[in-house]
Image (cartoon, grey):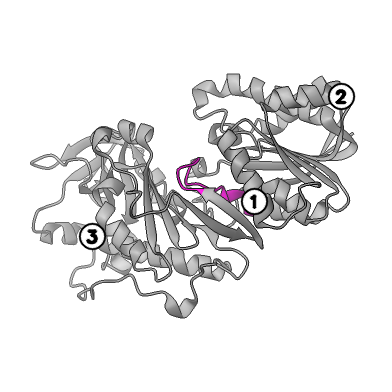
Amino acid sequence: MQHFPARLIKSLSTSTSLPCTTTTLQELASAHPKGVARVVLKKGKTQLFKDGSPMVYSGAVDRIIGRPPPRTGDVVLVADGAEKPIGWGMYNSVSMFCVRLMQLDEEAIRDCSCALNMEKLLETRINEAIELRKSLGLPSASTNAFRLVNSEGDRLSGLIIDIFGDVAVIASSAAWVEKYKAEIEACVGRINEINHINWRPSVEILKEEGLDVSNLKEMDPSICPQRTKVMENGIFYAISLEGQKTGFYADQRENRKFISTISDNQKVLDICCYSGGFALNAARGGAVNVTGVDSSLGAIKLAKENIALNNMDPGIISFVKEDASEFMKGALSRNESFDIVILDPPKLAPRKKVLQNASGMYRNLNSLAMQLTRRGGLLMTCSCSGAMTQSGTFLRILQSAASAAGRKITVLRDAGAACDHTIDPSYPEGKYLSNILLRVL
């Protein structure tokens, strides 16, 4: 198992900053050898960004001052209507997000070492992320899979870094991240225990960022392994680095551990189980029978491999490849019921415009899951769709599902992503995961 002892983390800083001789972004920009373009906000829009909102959308922009005009990936100033800078960030000429703000003016006044310097800012923010995870106990003797950088939550909008043992998976969803790929890889590569870096560009999002995705490159199989093994809360997982998202859903770590605390002597069903996280925790927690279901053959193969990795009894825990709805309908026709049901479907509402259709799918899946839960039993149901979580309608949908199932539900626990999945309160769109535990009567 790989982890980062505090004494083994190298400083990411590659240079010593010179003492500041100027105190404001205005003065720093004036002294910049190449000059810095200025994105001027419309009247009435400034306070939102002064308050910390990291995404300057194109509709908030009045005009852009600079000759030649800035190009995608350039550092720009963001200014109020009087053209006074309020901060700086990374520009995009195509995206609906015109600027991703990186630092406000008052921060530059306190410490100008990172001002208008993306390389230095990357070093600083990644170092801060390492220290924050250390303070949260990550990594530890029992867990070496966690999120190191969580985009806006760590003030590096568009950049996600997951650590899986000695592998760092870097997910890119912004043009500036692709521009600074070498610098990011260099920062991550200086973490002692990291031996491999897997670069995962989010192709569809980067298309919207205006990039030519035909030139984007993922990992080189000769350099980075396609599979690895990690430990989470003392349970081993084989993960595919070519699989879903970054390869492993570390966001559910605390919720999976919770399942292990309530599963003793219970019959458990894990629907949309992927590589078996909830099911394995239920078995570790003393469940007498655990069934995991997923429609992906690759996921089921991983889940079955994880049974052997953890020396678990295949007579107690098993995995089935089948569509979630079809499995639940079949189980109902056989009059089966379970003490605990976990339902963690894939993202059904990637965008607000499909929220209505997704709501119907969530309602139908949860109605079936509630019918399979014995009266008095527990249902842990999830949505990883940001559009659903931010709409505030998930509980209403669950109530509608309960009514359709002829059941009564009580909320026992309302949780989200694990603590390493940091959230910027000025960017609520970063909160995407809902995890709700219900008693079903």
Distance of label 1 from label 2 (alpha carbons): 28 Å
Distance of label 1 from label 3 (alpha carbons): 45 Å
- Magenta highlight range: 240-253
- The 10 Å Cα crowd at callout 2, few under 14, some 14 to 19, many 20 or more, is few
Query: Mark 3: which secondary structure?
Result: loop
* Mark closest to the chain's N terminus, 2 or 3: 3
Residue 431 at x, y percent in the picture: 55, 44
Which of the two residues, 25 or 354, is positioned nearer the viewer here? 354
> Looking at the image, which residue is at 23% across and 73% down?
15
Residue 303 at x, y percent in the picture: 64, 45
> Looking at the image, which residue is at 87% across and 24% down?
334
- The 10 Å Cα crowd at callout 1, few under 14, some 14 to 19, many 20 or more, is many
Task: Look at mark 2 in the image and give the residue it sits on.
Answer: 334
* Mark closest to the chain's N terminus, 1 or 3: 3
> Which SS does the magenta portion mostly show?
loop
Which of the two residues, 397 or 249, is positioned nearer the viewer here? 249
> Looking at the image, which residue is at 23% across and 60% down?
117
Q: Quadrant of the C terminus?
A: top right
Task: Look at mark 3 in the image and give the residue it sits on.
Answer: 117
Question: Hey, what amino acid is under mark 3?
Answer: Asn
Asked if one can make out residue 274 in the rendered structure from this viewpoint, the answer is no
Question: Hey, what amino acid is under mark 2?
Answer: Arg
- Marks 1 and 3 close (CB-CB < 8 Å): no
Query: Mark 1: which secondary structure?
Result: helix
Left or right of residue 29: residue 335: right
Q: Quadrant of the N terminus?
A: bottom right
Residue 317 at x, y percent in the picture: 76, 46
Question: Hey, what amino acid is under mark 1?
Answer: Asn
Distance of label 2 from label 3 (alpha carbons): 64 Å
Residue 249 lies within the magenta run:
yes
Query: Mark 2: which secondary structure?
Result: loop
Which of the two residues, 399 or 54, is positioned nearer the viewer here? 399
